[in-house]
């Protein structure tokens, strides 16, 4: 079973916003065995929409569309659907009652005519009820292809995908199985990993596909198998994984699918009943935000001091002004003091501390742009590593975050083994 | 002049990563007057790539392609380009020398054959030199259409777009002007704004397009004009903006194009020579990270305490345990103390403080999920507002961040007027 995803909106085509809806929909469909053939982002333009519908007609089983369902004049998806399906808009009374109640409850005012017109839907469509917003989803078929139109507001789209679209597909279609297994490796580059597994890769069966997903400091290897016999696929992938482990077991740090390092680290901390705090300078709160973004983080994460200004490293974290003067604010010594002092302040088992110069200007330090020190306070002491992550600023920050989490993960595992 | 953007990679089609490259390229092209007709994400599959090239051939002037240029077997873009252009790969000695030097410098080892083969490029292509990575960009023409292939690693893609692709287009093509003007409104929903400006909107000239970009608590209105006479377009847009201001001046808070609120706030703080710190609980460092992510932030941003655990609100921020016991940790009183105490600790003019319950579980507080208090310490005192942002967790965090920056912006402007 094949699908395509269309995102409608000029704001995407001029780069004003990034389309995150397609990724969410893709993941949800992939989970139930639907292969995404392509994703398209097109203009709020009637002809562009009609052309794209025609292009996908009978080429895929289902087309998921987001955007263009708002109440304003630039939202033309519904009218265009009527053109394409030779249909007319009719008022759905259930949707209208919901819109009126929602506007009164959320905004404490009466629904305007424009709000109420959200209840106009193509007569041939099945309404997908949107509990969390005013624009309903619509499900409408032509030939071999079902078109599903969803609002572009991310949490409304997510609600409809999870509660309406996926259950309806699962009910109405037979699907093959798609199984992914992901192996996370650390410390060797993509081409080195590829060389080590070349023979194995060349001998993979046809129904198994390998992908390399490199990121700063790490490479994810994703194996994908497609077929109708789920247990056969599972066995075959487990077999392949065992062979892979025998080749590169030394650099494999995890097997979980789609898990980020902050999730892995969080689970390790929870399992070992250990706690964490952070003391950030050049990463500016990014490590804190990643860790705190995971639900349940309050079980192991105490918090962070983002000591962005040099004076705050002294005042909040008690870094000695002598240390800063002798070694400069971007130094191993400052990183160490940040980590060790924070360990006392937060009373945690581990502290990640970062200090560096992310650029583009040199700031309070004479260190070369890209220089970063990461210190890790542990129950046994403190380690510190120096890096030069080059430029630009975002790369320096991202690599610092990745490396800091990697250092923490290694250290927790070491203390456990 | 029209363009299309293709992203190649199964990891996007299964939702494992979100494509942010297309947005960056779109913005860069939009700035130089190129209209993006569509964006497509397709599989690492030879036939899918060939079909998409054929679909766009002579339909657009330029096709930007990212992804599939790595050294591993799943990277097939170069071979597929050779098929499409009936070309062969040849070794580019400049690129090879660069790859060898880069690997030696960055990884302190010799380049492998796989690394060196990054220097193989289609003979008909012009190499776009990639200073920051091993995969070169390629520029190759067929019929009316230029195809430009770029690596998928974001900072390498960005380097090539900024330093090679955009300058080359500017040099070689005449382009029309595309001008956007964006108006940022606060406090009224999309449909209410639309009703207030309906007559004006209906009378916009054909070459001006209006788009509504709603987000939590705010609506951006974007006017886009296309044409060959830049000063005429500018005058016309300024005229339309003046009319718009006379209609909804009461809710307009800014006019800048594509500016995020953290950029606006940062510039205001710099202009007024004021300083800021943050004290975050439920937002977990996200406000800090947004503010610190802007280069030059060290001029006005002192740092943040992310007091994620309740005890840290007392220990680091000096919130009285009586206050927490009497009012609970999610309360106006705790938010106020967090803000006022941080103002003393950081010695800043302004402090944003957040405490709330983002869900999904209730944590240390009995407050309903979605309840958030935001306090703002100012040179004149402290304000605090209560919100209920509902669910899910990410929406609560995002709306808290947006509302906090909005409160700060309003307050700075008030103190200035």
Image (cartoon, coloured by chain):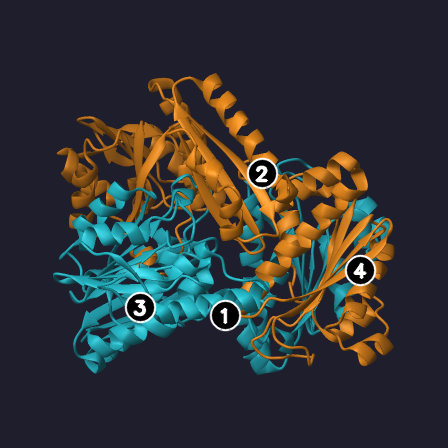
Chain colours: A cyan, B orange
Query: Of helix, strand and loop, which one carries label 3?
Result: strand
Looking at the picture, tell me which residue is in the foreground, B103 or B400. B400
Residue carrying label 4: B339
Q: Evaluate if marks 3 and 2 touch, with contact meaning CB atoms under 8 Å apart.
A: no
**Residue B237 at what x, y percent from top left?**
50, 27
Q: CA–CA distance between discs 1 and 4?
A: 37 Å
Q: Which residue is mark 3?
A: A127
| Frontmost residue, A243 versus A303 | A303
Q: CA distance from mark 4 to mark 3?
A: 47 Å
Question: Mark 1 against mark 3, which lies toward the viewer?
Answer: 1
Residue B297 badge: none
Q: Are marks 1 and 3 in contact (CB under 8 Å)?
A: no
* Residue under the point 60% across and 35% down: B245
Spot occupied by residue B86 in the image (x, y as percentages of width and height):
12, 34
Crowding at dot 2, Cα within 10 Å, few <14 / some 14-19 / many 20+, comes out as some
Q: Residue at x 75, y 59 (%)?
A: A338
Question: Does any portion of residue A197 appear in the rendered image?
Answer: no
Residue A140 appears in the rendering: yes
Q: Quadrant of residue A161?
A: bottom left
**Dot 2 or dot 4, earlier in sequence:** 2
């Amino acid at each position: 079973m094949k699908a395509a995803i269309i995102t409608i909106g000029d704001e995407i085509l001029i780069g004003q916003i990034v389309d995150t809806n397609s990724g969410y929909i893709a993941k949800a469909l992939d989970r139930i065995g639907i292969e995404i053939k392509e994703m398209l982002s097109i203009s709020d333009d009637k002809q562009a929409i009609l052309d794209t519908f025609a292009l996908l007609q009978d080429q895929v089983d289902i087309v998921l569309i987001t955007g263009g369902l708002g109440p304003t004049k630039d939202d033309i998806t519904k009218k265009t659907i009527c053109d394409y399906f030779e249909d007319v808009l009719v008022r759905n009374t259930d949707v209208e009652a919901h819109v009126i109640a929602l506007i009164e409850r959320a905004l404490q005012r009466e629904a305007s005519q424009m709000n109420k017109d959200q209840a106009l839907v193509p007569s041939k469509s099945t309404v997908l009820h949107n509990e969390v917003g005013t624009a309903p989803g619509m499900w409408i078929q032509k030939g071999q292809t079902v078109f599903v139109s969803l609002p572009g507001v991310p949490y409304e789209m997510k609600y409809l995908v999870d509660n309406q679209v996926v259950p309806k597909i699962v009910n109405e279609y037979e699907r093959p199985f798609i199984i992914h297994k992901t192996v996370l490796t650390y410390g060797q580059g993509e081409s080195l990993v590829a060389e080590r597994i070349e023979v194995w890769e060349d001998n993979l069966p046809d129904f198994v596909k390998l992908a390399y997903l490199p990121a700063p400091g790490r490479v994810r290897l994703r194996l994908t198998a497609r077929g109708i016999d789920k247990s056969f696929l599972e066995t075959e992938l487990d077999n392949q994984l065992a062979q892979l482990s025998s080749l590169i077991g030394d650099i494999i740090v995890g097997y979980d699918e789609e898990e980020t390092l902050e999730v892995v680290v969080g689970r390790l901390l929870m399992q070992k009943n250990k706690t964490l705090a952070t003391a950030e300078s050049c990463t500016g709160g990014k490590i804190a935000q990643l860790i705190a973004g995971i639900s349940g983080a309050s079980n192991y994460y105490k918090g962070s001091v983002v000591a962005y200004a040099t004076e705050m490293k002294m005042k909040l974290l008690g870094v000695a002004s002598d240390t800063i003067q002798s070694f400069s604010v971007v130094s191993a010594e400052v990183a160490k003091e940040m980590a060790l002092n924070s360990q006392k302040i937060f009373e945690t088992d581990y502290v990640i501390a970062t200090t560096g110069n992310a650029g583009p200007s040199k700031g309070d330090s004479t260190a070369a742009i890209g220089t970063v020190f990461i210190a890790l306070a542990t129950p046994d002491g403190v380690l510190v590593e120096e890096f030069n992550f080059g430029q630009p600023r975002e790369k320096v920050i991202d690599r610092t975050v990745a490396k800091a989490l990697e250092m923490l993960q290694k250290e927790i595992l070491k203390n456990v083994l």
